[in-house]
Image: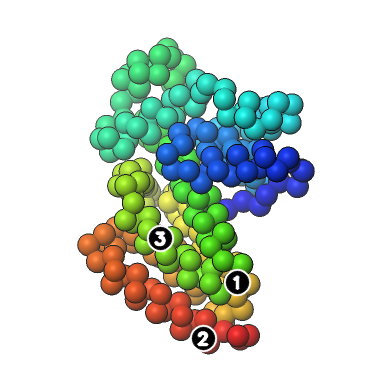
Amino acid sequence: MTGERDDALPAGDRALLDATIADPAMPDYLAIRALAVLAQDDRLARFTAMGHQFVAEARRRLRDDGAAALLADPPNVHERILELATRQIVSGGRGGLTMWVLAREADVPRRTLYNAYSTSGELAEACRRRAQTIWRARFERRVLAADARAARRLLATVEAIGDWVASARFRDDEALRAGSAAAGDERADDLHEHLTEIDRFATGLAVEARIASPQAFGAFVATMVAGAAAWVHRRDTMRNASIAYVERLIVRARVP
């Protein structure tokens, strides 16, 4: 999803930030803070739904006070809104997101909420994009850490998706994703953007593994993520078939 920042970080700070991103038990706002200071993608302000000022301030806080202080700060108003809105969507779907209830739970004036997000649909889109950004960061980190060998990382993508489908988090992730694929304008569809980023990452893995059709592998991984709900009741079959397909790609690689 994003390259690492060039800035030299103390090893302890980097380890703490990486652990925060990787741990699904961490509140999402903390994972977003860690991503904001580790990643260098110019689109990060949008991907995290937090804006450029937040990203700049998080990086300043890290530089001045360190990772522990950055993560210890209580959630700000914007973070609190997104955390609670995400919880509402997970609990009741997109239709369960009610702005007046959210304003009360977040303890913010309704005017403040509507100044940030003019409609519940706009807020739901921000929650989805933020959740998908965290998902990609965890997925990429797991795949890259699985093995130093490029070919084995291709297989790690299948294992990561299979384990995700079996996880307690899967239902929540699917609830956040619901409805985004129906957007009329594909350019504005956050799910389409999410899958494009996954395709890009997987294609890069395949290029490193020197397989004959890296773009086909990228499309394969993005399709697996898009159709992950189909894995739920036939998980072992889907995993085994996907592994067999990837193994055939590796065997036919240009360079063993």
- Helix, strand or loop under label 1: loop
**Alpha carbon distance from label 3 to label 1:** 19 Å
Kindly identify which numbered label has been placed on residue 149. Answer: 1
- Helix, strand or loop under label 2: helix
- Note whether 165 is above or below 46 in the view shown: below
Residue drawn at the location 33% of the way across and 43% of the way down: 172
- Tag 2 residue: 251
* Among numbered discs 1 and 2, the one appearing first in the sequence: 1
* Among numbered discs 3 and 1, the one appearing first in the sequence: 1
Residue 51 lies, in percent from the top left, at 59, 32
Residue 221 lies, in percent from the top left, at 45, 66
Q: Are marks 1 and 2 in contact (CB under 8 Å)?
A: no
Depth check, front residue: 228 or 94: 228
- Tag 3 residue: 161
Residue drawn at the location 63% of the way across and 26% of the way down: 69
Residue drawn at the location 39% of the way across and 64% of the way down: 224
